[in-house]
C-alpha cells in the first residue's frame, strides 16, 4: 500500500507585479531567490520546500507553450510561513520597521501565535509558530 504525502514540496501564489513581489519577499522576509523568469515566475527556497510566485496572466494562458499544465488564480491567496516562537516579537518589529502593517495577531488555543499581513499584491501572509497546529515536533528548523 502506498503511503500518504508527508509534507508540502512546493506551494504557489499569484501576483501581477513580479518585481514588486521579488523586492518584498527578498528584502522584507529574507527569502532565498533560486530561480526567476522575467514576467513569468519567481522561485524561493525555504528549507526543504519551495515557494513559487507566478504571474497568472502568463501561466494560465493556453496560447503560451508551458512545460507544465496551465494554472493561475485571480484574487488574494493565503500562505503561512513557520517562524520560531522566540522570534515572533522580532518579526512584528521588523515588519513594522519596513512599513508592513500587521493586520491581525492571533493567539491559538494550543499556544501558537500568528501575525497576518498583506504582500504588495494583497495576498494574506501569515508568520506562525509551529504550536498553532500542535505539531511543534514535526516542524524542524534547519
Image: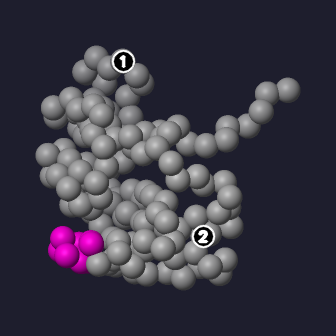
Is 93 rendered above or below residue 82?
Answer: below
Q: CA distance from mark 2 to mark 1?
A: 36 Å
Residue 93 location, quadrant: bottom left
Q: How many marks?
A: 2
The quarter in which the N terminus is drawn is: top right
Q: Reading the chain from its start, which is encountered first: label 2 or label 1? A: 1
Depth order, front residue of 112/55: 112
Image coords of residue 36 (percent x, y):
23, 32
- Residue under the image location 25 percent in, 21 percent down: 64
The colour scheme used here is one colour
Q: Quadrant of residue 107?
A: bottom right
Give the residue furthest to the right.
1
Within 10 Å of disc 2 (Cα), the crowding (few <14, some 14-19, many 20+) is some
Q: Is residue 7 visible?
A: yes
Which residue occupies the foreground of this view, 46 or 56? Answer: 46
The 10 Å Cα crowd at callout 1, few under 14, some 14 to 19, many 20 or more, is few
Residue hosting label 1:
67
Towards the viewer: 79 or 23: 23
Residue occupied by mark 2:
132
**Residue 121 pos. (x, y %):** 23, 58
Q: Position of residue 120 (x, y in %)?
A: 21, 60
Is 122 on the left-hand or right-hand side of 69? left
| Label 2 residue SS | helix
- Which residue is at a point 24% across and 60% down the rendered structure image? 28
**Mark 2 or 1, which is nearer the eye?**
2
Tell me: 107 left or right of 12. Answer: right
Q: Secondary structure at mark 1?
A: loop
Q: Is-magenta flag for residue 98?
A: yes
Magenta residues, as a range? 94-101
Amino acid at each position: 500500500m502506498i503511503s500518504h504525502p508527508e509534507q508540502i514540496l512546493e506551494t504557489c501564489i499569484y501576483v501581477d507585479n513580479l518585481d514588486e513581489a521579488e523586492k518584498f519577499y527578498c528584502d522584507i522576509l529574507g527569502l532565498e531567490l533560486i530561480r526567476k523568469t522575467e514576467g513569468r515566475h519567481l522561485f524561493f527556497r525555504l528549507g526543504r520546500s519551495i515557494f513559487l510566485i507566478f504571474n497568472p496572466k502568463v501561466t494560465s494562458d493556453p496560447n503560451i507553450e508551458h512545460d507544465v499544465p496551465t494554472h493561475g488564480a485571480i484574487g488574494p491567496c493565503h500562505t503561512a510561513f513557520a517562524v520560531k516562537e522566540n522570534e515572533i516579537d522580532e518579526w512584528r518589529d521588523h515588519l513594522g520597521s519596513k512599513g508592513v502593517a500587521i493586520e491581525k495577531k492571533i493567539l491559538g488555543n494550543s499556544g501558537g501565535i500568528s501575525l497576518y499581513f498583506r504582500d504588495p499584491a494583497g495576498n494574506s501572509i501569515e508568520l506562525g509558530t509551529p504550536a498553532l497546529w500542535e505539531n511543534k515536533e514535526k516542524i524542524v528548523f534547519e
